[in-house]
């Protein structure tokens, strides 16, 4: 029995394990720890596919296992994190207002992220257009965005914009992005040359610059840049695709 065929699935299981730990940490109120675990899981999610392609050991079981792991780590975890984050916002608002408004019903909208992540993964598994790119926001990007919001807790300017209603709008927007028909490029490397990867390398370089300048607080910005960058690439390349198909 060849060991190498089990390497990608082992990495996927480590991703799933990180997701389970992130859920535990979220319920214990350690949202920053949960965010770091999601970040580690995203790295593992990248390398399981990369390892499968490099070792040429792709399989149907591996694909299904990857989606099941992603459902927990990048589907359930962000819903749980946003739920607890909204609870914390509500408690904070109650301390500084004389009008006791019940925002608790909004908290449960966080689980729309779980529902739409499930739909997103189901579509991905049955959409042949998404072998080298994505149609709709990938679940890891969605999870990283929401889990990394905890790093903005020391930014008064950003916190002034965060309230239950702005979070509700954000949840609805990102839920729609998960199942949208918007093309987004994938960080899937079949080789490390510049040709064919210039968009990926350009984005990674820009992301590194954002991290150097803003550190952890730049992570949500990177996800927004990823969405905007993908839209710009699609608009620029659209005339070329039309001319090739005509």
Image (spheres, helix red, strand yellow):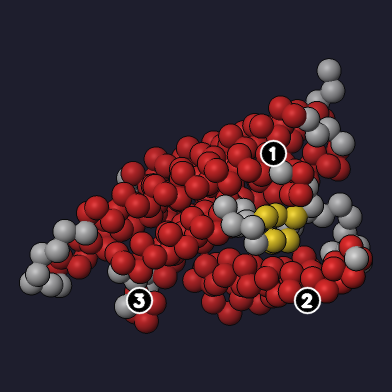
Question: Which callout, 2 or 3, points at the residue further toward the start of the chain?
Answer: 3
Residue 34 place in picture, x, y as percent: 45, 50
- Which mark's residue is nearer the viewer, 1 or 3? 1
Instruction: Looking at the image, tell me whether mark 1 or mark 3 is earlier in sequence order.
Output: 1
Question: Given the current orientation, which residue lies at the most extreme top position?
Answer: 1
Image location (x, y in percent) of residue 27 = 33, 44
- Few, some or many C-alpha atoms within 10 Å of disc 2 (few <14, some 14-19, many ≥20)? few
Res. 55 image quadrant: top right
- Residue 145 at x, y percent in the picture: 51, 61
Camera-side residue of 43 and 228: 228
223 with respect to 151 (left or right): right
In the rendered image, the quadrant that contains the C terminus is bottom right
Q: Pointer 1: what residue?
A: 126
What is the distance, in whole Å, between disc 2 and disc 3 at their CAs?
A: 33 Å
Tell me the residue that label 3 is attached to. 161
Q: In this orientation, does residue 205 appear? A: no
In the picture as drawn, the residue positioned furthest to the left comes out as 98
Residues under numbered marks 1 and 3 in contact, where contact means CB atoms less than 8 Å apart: no
Q: Is residue 134 above or below residue 51?
A: below
Task: Using residue 62 as the reference point, say whether residue 19 is left or right of it.
Answer: left
Say what secondary structure mark 3 lies in.
loop
**Any mark on residue 236, and which?**
2
Q: Secondary structure at mark 2?
A: helix
The answer to which quarter of the image holds residue 178 is: bottom right
User: Residue sitting at 45 percent across and 50 percent down?
Assistant: 113
């Amino acid at each position: 029995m060849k060991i190498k065929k089990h390497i990608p699935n082992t990495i996927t299981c480590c991703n799933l394990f990180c997701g389970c730990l992130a859920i535990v940490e979220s319920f214990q109120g350690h949202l920053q720890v949960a965010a770091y675990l999601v970040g580690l899981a995203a790295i593992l999610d990248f390398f399981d596919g990369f390892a499968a392609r490099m070792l040429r050991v792709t399989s149907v079981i591996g694909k299904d296992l990857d989606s099941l792991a992603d459902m927990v780590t990048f589907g359930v975890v962000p819903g749980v994190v946003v739920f607890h984050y909204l609870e914390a916002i509500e408690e904070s608002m109650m301390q500084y207002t004389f009008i006791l408004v019940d925002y608790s019903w909004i908290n449960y909208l966080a689980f729309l992220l779980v529902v739409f992540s499930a739909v997103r993964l189901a579509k991905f598994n049955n959409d042949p257009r998404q072998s080298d790119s994505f149609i709709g926001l990938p679940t890891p990007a969605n999870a990283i965005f929401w889990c990394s919001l905890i790093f903005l807790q020391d930014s008064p300017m950003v916190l002034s914009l965060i309230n239950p209603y702005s979070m509700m709008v954000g949840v609805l927007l990102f839920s729609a992005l998960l199942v949208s028909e918007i093309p987004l490029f994938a960080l899937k490397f079949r080789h490390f040359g510049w040709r064919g990867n210039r968009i990926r390398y350009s984005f990674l370089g820009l992301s590194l610059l954002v991290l150097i300048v803003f550190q952890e607080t730049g992570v949500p910005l990177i996800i927004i840049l990823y969405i905007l960058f993908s839209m710009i690439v699609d608009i620029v390349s659209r005339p070329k695709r039309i001319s090739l198909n005509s």
